[in-house]
Image (spheres, rainbow, N blue to C red):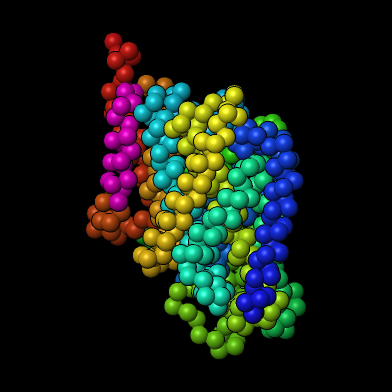
Amino acid sequence: MSPFQISLVIILYFIGLYIISWFTSRNANTHTFFTANRKSPWYLVAFGMIGASLSGVTFISVPGEVGNSAFAYFQFVLGNLVGYWLVASILLSLYYRLNLVSIYTYLGQRFGVYGYKTGAFFFILSKLVGAAFRFYLVALVLQVAFFDALGIPFSLTVFISMALIWIYTQRAGIKTIVWTDTLQTLFLVSAVIFTIVSISRALDLDASELATTIINHPSAQIFNWDWAAGNNFFKQFFAGIFMTIAMVGLDQDMMQKNLTCKTKKESQKNMLVFSALFVATVFLFLCLGVLLYVYANNQHIPIPLNTDNLYPNLAINELGIGVTIAFLLGIISAAYSSADSALTALTTSFCFDFLGFKKEGHNCKTVTRKIVHISFSILVAAVVIIFHAMNNESVVMAVFKAAGYTYGPLLGLFVFGMYTNRVVNDFYIPFIALLAPILSWLITENSEKLLFGYKFGFEVLILNAGLMWLGLRVLPKKKSQMS
């Protein structure tokens, strides 16, 4: 594609986003920014959440990772499915019953101010790291594939991108995102389907032959029963359950969308429908991964050492202008569908959890909210640039590895709060929350020596949360509770 064609596609894409933003921001106020006035259609939220959940990590890394670990990632996704059901039945009921805007308000009610601030802090840390990881991947692909040709440096690409996000989300916030996520999900999923169709035509495969090619390919193996392996089924499955509870149910970003639905019943319906669509879409990405390797081998195209580059290389250089345009729209959608909602969630948490916004009467806080929103835009951009200077592994692995350490204390806090009646001295909670990830890292680094060859994978989250729970269990009770 020429620089002019690239620019045209990007401009048209953003025109679409800004049209949506204009319609959704009419009569918007600060309450609209945080809650969308609790009027979002549940089916719109369900479809839009696919793009926000998958993001650039799935769009690029998952197809490439098929060559390294086959369909083993699907074991994790099956755990995700169960996790979504638990979030719908347990956590959404809690949040709607308490009528929360920031979900970490619950921790203040259950533990006190130190527990509350600790939970909110670990969310902000987790979301900053996760959003930066996800945005880094797609920004890098856009840079190498398109923006280098325009002479735009990577740092400028990142800051311009974050500025564009701030512009279309700064007025209506989560209300705009619910609608833009729908458009972005449509582009993201369409790009994958279009690529699969193009490869099948290039290889002269009908629908039956296409299915047979995927099923019979060595990389289509899903289950691994080796107990010591990092991608053992039970490790992946249970890690998928708890990772979903932590990264969705305990994440202000994902829950804020759900809490814009009118009622708890509609929100739960949204989550159940979304979970089925999510599993089907990830399976589609894995099938694409097989076909990318089949096509590359058939055409004698070298497989890149970094498998994250496989899909971009083929889409841009080998599969024609139609796939290139579809890929460009898909990767831009992947970038913005996760980054825009992350910024809104970070702004919401900071305003409510650290600046003391209340559900009622916060329209006067508009200026403060805008300053926080733009500050987080700059901060995320800065973290992306730092990650660009030090990254050297598959981003899909890096995201979940980081999440295991940063979401673990959150998961431990919520589980302890919801399933015990013990009232602890919450002054010590921040120290336990720092100690649990450190101990988890020490254990995982030495697990093969200490645990007869056992190697931790994504289930480090469970270990981390368990250590947090144990730490809370041994804390002294508050003085008012001691006899």
Classify 111 as above or below 437: above
Q: Nearer the viewer, residue 202 or 118?
A: 118
Picture quadrant of residue 16: bottom right
Using residue 112 as the reference point, say whether residue 44 is left or right of it. right
Relative to 177, residue 313 above or below: below
- Residue at 64% in and 47% down: 177
Using the rendered view, name the quadrant where residue 425 is placed. top left
Give the magenta part as a residue range: 424-441
- The location of residue 407, given as percent across then percent down, is 42, 44
Q: Is residue 437 magenta?
A: yes
Q: Is residue 95 placed above or below 436 in the rendered structure?
A: above
Q: Residue sitting at 40 percent across and 49 percent down?
A: 404
State the quadrant of the N terminus. bottom right
Q: Which residue lies most toward the top here? A: 483
- Left of 389 or right of it: where is 49? right
Quadrant in the picture for the C terminus = top left
Q: Residue at x 44, y 78 (%)?
A: 305
- Please check the rendered image and state whether residue 227 is part of the magenta-colored stretch, yes or no: no
The x, y position of residue 438, in whole percent, is 28, 47
| Left or right: 206 in relation to 145 | right
From the top left corner, tell me how far across and down residue 48 is, in percent.
67, 50
Tell me where residue 220 appears, x and y as whole percent.
Answer: 57, 70
Secondary structure mainly formed by the magenta segment: helix
> Does 437 sit above or below residue 190?
above
Residue 248 in sight in this render: no
